[in-house]
Image: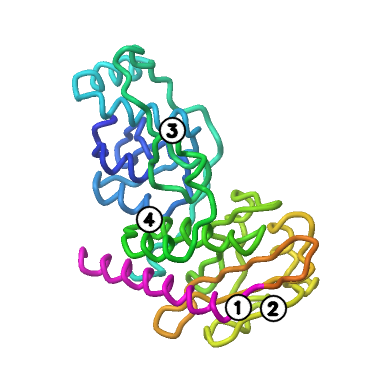
Amino acid sequence: MLSLVPPALARRLRAVPFERLPIHLKVAMINPRDPVALEEIAEVTGLEVLPFIATETAVLEAIARLDAGPQEVAADVAATDAGGDWDRLWQPPRARPQQLLELRRPPRAERQPASRDIATFPGLASVPAETASEADHPIDEATFRGQLASTIHRDEVARLTLRYAAGFFNRVCLFVVHRGSVLGWAGRGHGVVVDDLQSYTVPLDEKSLFHDFLSGTRYHLGPIPDDRANQGLLRVLGDPKPLSALLLPICVRDRAVAFLLADNPNEQVVAPVEHLVSVLAAVGLAIEVLILRKKISG
């Protein structure tokens, strides 16, 4: 069963299949609402993916068994069985938590030095265990631009953007424009619960904070209106509510495809806005490169 998804793909997507049905494949995932991961697995397997949330430990252990070799994986599976463009990249599904994987741990002597992932979405790149805590630290602009140039996945772009912005703000969130709505994408910092953030959605035609900035030519700096249209946004930002916030569009070809929303709880925002605008232009270019790669690969 585990062999349905190639090990390299499983490691990159943090996803492991655990049950095959006639036309469906049940897959354990750290982030079951990742639409790109779901599309890639469906393309590889030819099956419709049913995503389930699993603990990071369970998924990484299952992936480790993929790396252990086909014979060991086959034996473990037998034992267990006895018991488009930018818009196309987004369509978040949702699943209820369940206990999914009951794989035996490999003998201690056979275990290789472990690498582990950054614990929370959208971390993707594996890092040595002794430096894992460092992988979430804020980064300077030179590091940010250097790593941004080599990204191959949208969530890598998000992770780097959040790490850079964390040098200026204690709470940073990213939102994506998708199919007529703005959706929560990724976040970090004071009061941010990523699962809550990713549940956020607001139609583009609703007079929310995002409505007047879709052209990508302006930004917002000031309080978030505490009105009906922004109640959902204020709720997912957590406590305390921002005294003031900075909203910057991330554009591809003069169209906002995402937004960065940042603040320092209990403080007024003081930040080099124009410089941040120029940095986010690089983020837009990175996203455009991902879109072009997707088109080229078909």
Counting other residues with Cα less than 10 Å from the Cα at mark 3, is it few (<14), some (14-19), or many (20 or more)? some
Residue occupying image coordinates x 61% and y 81%: 219
Mark 4 or mark 3, earlier in chain: 4
Asked which secondary structure carries label 1, the reply is helix
Mark 2 or mark 4, earlier in chain: 4
Q: Which residue is mark 3?
A: 129
Residue occupying image coordinates x 69% and y 52%: 190
Measured as percent of width and height from the top left, residue 181 is found at: 55, 71
Quadrant in which the N terminus appears: top left
Give the magenta part as a residue range: 271-298
Kindly identify the amino acid type of the residue bearing the numbered disc 2: Leu
Render colour scheme: rainbow
Q: Is residue 134 left or right of residue 42?
A: right
In three-dimensional space, the C-alpha distance between marks 3 and 2, rounded to whole angstroms, equals 39 Å
Asked which secondary structure carries label 3, the reply is helix
Q: Is residue 77 left or right of residue 234?
A: left
Front tag of 4 and 1: 1
Out of 137 and 101, give the one closest to the viewer. 137
Q: Which residue is mark 1?
A: 273
Kindly identify the amino acid type of the residue bearing the numbered disc 1: Val
Q: Main secondary structure of the magenta part?
A: helix
Q: Which residue is mark 2?
A: 221
